[in-house]
């Protein structure tokens, strides 16, 4: 199945087909050693969580240290949940963020006039949950599982067949319950622009499993072609 993905403008839609590499983002790093494993394995983007209730949350100082020695071409994403514009701007400057990922209850207006490109996360359980997503002025749309007041990192997936007829208004990033055992199937079925994982490559909440990181990246790369 080939998913249709928008480029942020109406009537400009691209297909991610069998000859396109699916981008890989791993979120929730707290240890520099784990980050280096992901980079060496070929990750495209890494995510830092600036949401204190999360077991993967880092402070601004910790985030700054994690990204201090990143090589070029690795994108740094900051995850925020209902944060103020001031908090987001401060994190962008101190931690040299490339992308802002809004993972809370932010409105389309909250996505405007931010200092970096924006990915909006949406929690999906039924077709109705797609309603209104086309109103978000964002560079990417991340689809996660809808759980009870959990803003990502639940390890649960949603029914990917819901995407069979969905024309995303921006490049689609698939998340929610992905792991080394199911990500190849997800890539082949959905053909997303990218995949995002956190819980699926952990040994315990907040602690990454390096073998899972390597295998996850390998599975995505093999399934992309």
Image: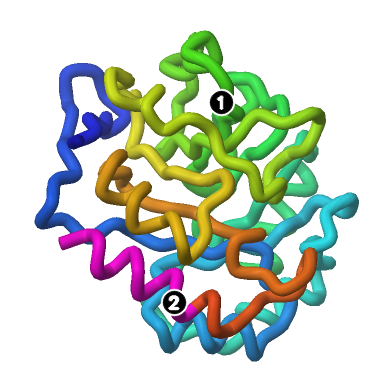
Residue 117 belongs to magenta span: no
- What residue is at 31 percent from the left and 47 percent from the top? 193
Q: Is residue 188 left or right of residue 23?
A: left
Q: Is residue 29 visible?
A: yes
- What residue is at 40 percent from the left and 23 percent from the top? 162
Q: Which dot, 1 or 2, sits closer to the camera? A: 2
Give how far across and how far down residue 181 sits, in percent: 46, 62
Which picture quadrant has residue 225? bottom left
Give how far across and how far down residue 28 sits, in percent: 67, 64
Residue 221 belongs to magenta span: yes
Nearest the viewer among 194 and 111 is: 194
Vertical placement of residue 116 versus 40, above or below: above
Please identify the quadrant where the N terminus is shown.
top left
Q: Which residue is mark 1?
A: 124
Distance (Cα) linking label 1 and label 2? 26 Å
Q: Is residue 155 left or right of residue 130?
A: right
Neighbours of disc 2 within 10 Å: few (<14), some (14-19), many (20+): some
Query: Bounds of the magenta span?
Result: 214-225
Q: Which residue is mark 2?
A: 215
- What residue is at 57 percent from the left and 29 percent from the top? 122
Per the rendering, the mark at residue 169 is: none
């Amino acid at each position: 199945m080939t998913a249709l993905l928008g480029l942020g403008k109406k009537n400009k839609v691209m297909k991610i087909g069998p000859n396109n590499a699916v981008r890989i983002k791993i979120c929730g790093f707290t240890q520099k050693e784990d980050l280096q494993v992901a980079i060496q394995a070929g990750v495209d983007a890494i995510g830092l969580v600036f949401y204190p209730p999360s077991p993967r949350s880092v402070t601004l100082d910790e985030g700054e240290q994690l990204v201090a020695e990143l090589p070029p071409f690795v994108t740094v994403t900051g995850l925020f949940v209902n944060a103020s514009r001031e908090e987001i701007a401060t994190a962008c400057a101190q931690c040299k963020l490339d992308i802002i990922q809004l993972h809370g209850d932010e409105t389309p207006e909250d996505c405007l006039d931010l200092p970096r490109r924006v990915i909006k996360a949406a929690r999906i359980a039924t077709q109705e949950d797609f309603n209104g997503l086309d109103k978000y002025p964002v560079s990417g749309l991340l689809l996660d599982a809808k759980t009870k007041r959990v803003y990502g990192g639940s390890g649960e997936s949603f029914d990917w067949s819901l995407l069979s007829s969905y024309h995303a208004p921006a490049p689609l990033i698939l998340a929610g319950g992905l792991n080394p055992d199911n990500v190849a199937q997800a890539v082949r079925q959905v053909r997303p622009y990218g995949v995002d994982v956190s819980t699926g490559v952990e040994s315990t909440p907040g602690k990454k499993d390096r073998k899972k990181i390597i295998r996850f990246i390998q599975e995505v790369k093999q399934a992309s072609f």
